[in-house]
Image (cartoon, rainbow, N blue to C red):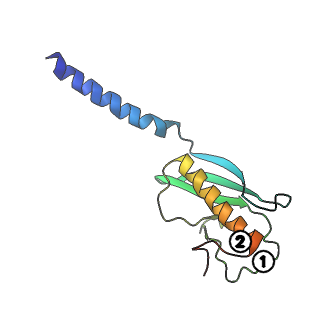
Amino acid sequence: MIFLLIIPIIVIAISVAVMIPRWRDPSEFNYNYYAVTNAAALDHQYKFFVKKVGNGYRCYIRRTPSYRGRDTSNYLPHYWVENKTDKHYICWTGEIKYPEQAKTLCRNWADATQKFIDTGVPAPGFKR
């Protein structure tokens, strides 16, 4: 009989344990990143504002380094523009559920963009 009482308690405890990380995740945060580069003396700082939108996060681009005169006509920087605010955010069709996933996306996007800035060679998928 006691066994029947313990099962619901265990189920509730597991359910709460699964939800706790979501309760602690911030609804928005700033993220700064210095992209990987061979030209460390030159600007390679990126700034992002990550905000919870719907069930996931969106990574807004607040700052990128200068493209140093690179011809961007054949380069697609992979960002979208939010209709209501005209803010740029990283082009990503998958759902970003956790802050660490958003940070990883920001780092990967910045590194790919920095590679183009440094070499003029777009990362795979960053071409028109």
Name the residue at 61% across, 79% down. Answer: 127
Q: Earlier in the sequence, mark 1 or mark 2?
A: 1
In the displayed structure, does residue 94 sit left or right of residue 128? Answer: left
Q: Secondary structure at mark 2?
A: helix
Q: Who is closer to the viewer here, 51 or 110?
A: 110
- Kind of residue indicated by mark 1: Arg
Q: Secondary structure at mark 1?
A: loop
- Which residue is at the far top? 2
Name the residue at 66% across, 66% down. Answer: 112
Where residue 115 sits: x, y (%)? Answer: 71, 67
Where residue 80 sits, quadrant-wise, is bottom right
In the displayed structure, does residue 16 sit left or right of residue 21? Answer: left
Number of numbered discs on residues: 2
Mark 1, residue position: 70
* C-beta proximity under 8 Å, tags 1 and 2: yes
Mark 2, residue position: 116
In the displayed structure, does residue 94 sit left or right of residue 40? Answer: left
- Quadrant location, the C terminus: bottom right
